[in-house]
């Protein structure tokens, strides 16, 4: 089972103006750095929580169907299943009829109930499930605690930018970051 993003978010949940206000900066000379820190902080929050903050597309690939009729989509919140595709031995794709599966997007993680499970002919990655996840298309759709976590990371990394190279980041997490994201973290099994 492999899960990867196919289309990233079109915007960041925190704007440059919000980050600069949080940092109490007015000059534009640091804008490219701050934009990069916002992007990196969003990615860190998404990795830590297993959440997709702004709407984005994901693909789950499987070698075979699970033994139960329920498949878990481990990126939340899931907005919709775009397609379920099964590949035969020659690599030809067949799209599964959407009326044969149902999405429970209210569960965490989201569940996909499969009424029909056509067998893949490919031994590796014979099944692809494409879905969209995220709180919405605007930064204001993202819960405030997660937006605050991004701002805390941006400020921390901005403060310590001269002490370490960009490739060394993140070298540390600021106090309070784990507390901000803790209620959004998935428990490890």
Image (cartoon, rainbow, N blue to C red):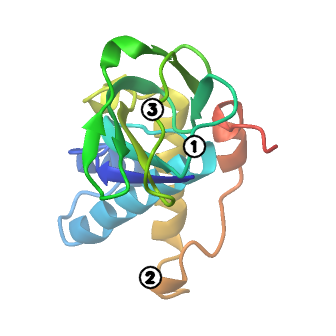
Query: From where the camera sits, is residue 13 visible?
Result: no
Instruction: Return the disc, 3 or 1, that comes first in the chain's sequence.
Output: 1
- Label 1 neighbourhood size at 10 Å, few (<14), some (14-19), many (20+)? some
* Residue at numbered disc 3: 118
Q: Between residues 58 and 96, which one lies in front from this camera angle?
A: 96
Give residue 112's mark: none
From the viewer's side, name the closer residue of 138 and 156: 138
Taking depth in this image into account, of 137 and 72 the one nearest to the observer is 72
Q: Is residue 144 left or right of residue 49?
A: left
Residues at badges 2 and 1 in contact (C-beta under 8 Å)? no
Q: 188 left or right of 29?
A: right
Report x, y in % for residue 63: 54, 52
- Residue 56 picture location, percent across and down: 31, 40
* Secondary structure beneath label 2: helix
Looking at marks 3 and 2 on the same chain, the residue that comes earlier in the sequence is marked by: 3
Residue tagged 2: 166
| Nearer the camera: disc 3 or disc 1 | 3
150 relative position to 5: left or right: right
Residue for point 47% across, 84% down:
167
Q: Is 188 on the left-hand or right-hand side of 170?
A: right
Is residue 50 depicted above or below 2 in this figure?
A: above
Badge number at residue 50: 1
**Residue 65 in the image: above or below residue 88:** above
Per the model, the C-alpha gap separating discs 3 and 1 is 29 Å
Relative vertical location of residue 44 with respect to residue 185 in this rendering, above or below: below
- The secondary element bearing badge 1 is classed as loop
Q: Secondary structure at mark 3?
A: loop
Q: Residue furthest right?
A: 189
Mark 3 nearby-residue class (10 Å; few <14, some 14–19, many ≥20): some
Task: State the residue at coordinates (54%, 13%).
Answer: 106
Given this view, does label 3 or label 2 mark the residue nearer the observer? 3
């Amino acid at each position: 089972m492999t899960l990867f993003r196919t289309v990233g978010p079109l915007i960041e949940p925190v704007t440059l103006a919000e980050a600069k206000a949080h940092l109490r900066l007015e000059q534009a000379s640091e804008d490219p750095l701050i934009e990069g820190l916002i992007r990196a902080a969003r990615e860190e929050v998404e990795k830590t929580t297993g959440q997709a903050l702004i709407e984005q597309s994901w693909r789950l690939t499987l070698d075979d169907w699970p033994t139960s009729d329920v498949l878990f989509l481990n990126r939340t919140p899931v907005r919709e299943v775009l397609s379920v595709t099964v590949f035969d031995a020659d690599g030809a794709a067949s799209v599964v009829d959407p009326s044969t599966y149902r999405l429970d997007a209210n569960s965490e993680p989201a569940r996909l109930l499969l009424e029909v499970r056509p067998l893949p002919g490919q031994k590796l990655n014979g099944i692809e499930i494409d879905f969209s996840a995220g709180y919405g298309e605007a930064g204001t759709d993202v819960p405030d605690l997660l937006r605050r976590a991004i701002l805390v990371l941006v400020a921390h990394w901005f403060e310590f930018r001269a002490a370490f190279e960009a490739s060394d980041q993140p070298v540390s997490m600021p106090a309070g970051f784990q507390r901000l994201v803790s209620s959004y973290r998935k428990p490890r099994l």
